[in-house]
Image (cartoon, grey):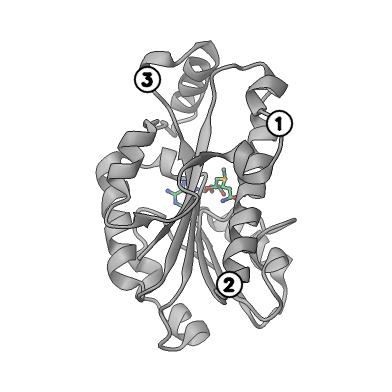
Amino acid sequence: MPFFPKLFKLIRWFLGEAVRRLGEEGYTQFIDFASGLPTVDHIHQVAPAGTKVIYTDIDPVTVAYGQELIKDNPNVRYGVCPAEEPENLLNSPLVEQLFGKNRKVAIGFNGVAYFIPDDKFQRSMKVLYEWAGKGSRLFLCDTGYEADIMKAAGRDMLALYQKLGQPLFLRSPKALEKLVQPWKVVAPGYQPLEQWVGVKSLETETRTQDFVMIGAILGK
Ligand SMILES: C[S@@+](CC[C@H](N)C(=O)[O-])C[C@H]1O[C@@H](n2cnc3c(N)ncnc32)[C@H](O)[C@@H]1O
């Protein structure tokens, strides 16, 4: 999968771009799912100083290492939570400890929806929507896959993840738009990640010719 390093950088760059925009719009509280490692260009490194951030991941080793990376930063926390069960975090004391009663948040859901089957993903979107305060935002990216145009690299990727015991659930942009409801898309809408971050096409660079990821900022 020679295009993976570029793909994962692209996801982190999109996340950074969304955070920069939301920071400029005055969002000061972020919850992030499937955060991975906050090494470079993650939320607390990109958002204005003083922004409060809760990172989460399903993998306890990632969380332990993430906690080491954020050290004793008083505005940042890192906890275990599966992205398909956001209530585990939302009902934990962590959120109220950091945010108080203020539920106007920006929520990150990047590079993980493709690990979650449709029904669970849809439920997670609804739980987050119902919990979040008015004016909240959700920034997410996922595969923009049309099954009928899938080519060799896409099929190889599906087979690889299947073998690893973590099957992928690829969906088209139309299917994604439906599953995220009742979150509503805000400008500029769904765009390929390259367009969000202003780099030339990943497809051209990697010559995979068939892998697209799209991202959007949604609102309540
Ligand atoms: C592609 S990375 C996510 C990248 C990160 N959001 C970023 O922007 O750099 C995938 C991460 O998702 C985590 N993960 C996989 N399945 C998950 C799930 N169901 N819930 C939460 N995290 C999950 C993995 O442990 C890994 O850290």
Q: Nearer the viewer, residue 196 or 125?
A: 196
Residue under pointer 1:
200
Q: Is residue 97 above or below residue 57?
A: below
Q: Is mark 3 within 8 Å of ligand 1?
A: no
Q: Quadrant of the N terminus?
A: top right
Residue contact at pointers 2 and 3, CB within 8 angstroms:
no
Dot 1 amino acid type: Lys
Q: Please report whichever mark, 2 or 3, sits nearer to the chain's N-terminal start.
A: 2
Q: Nearer the viewer, mark 2 or mark 3?
A: 3
**Some atom of ligand 1 lies within 8 Å of the CB belonging to the residue at label 1:** no
- Numbered circle sitting on residue 147: 3
Judge the density around disc 3: few (<14), some (14-19), many (≥20) Cα neighbours within 10 Å: few
Which residue corresponds to the image point at 52% horizontal and 83% vertical from the top-left?
98
Q: Image quarter for residue 170?
A: top left
Q: Which residue lies under the disc numbered 2?
A: 53
Q: Which mark's residue is nearer the viewer, 1 or 3?
A: 1
179 relative to 139, above or below: above
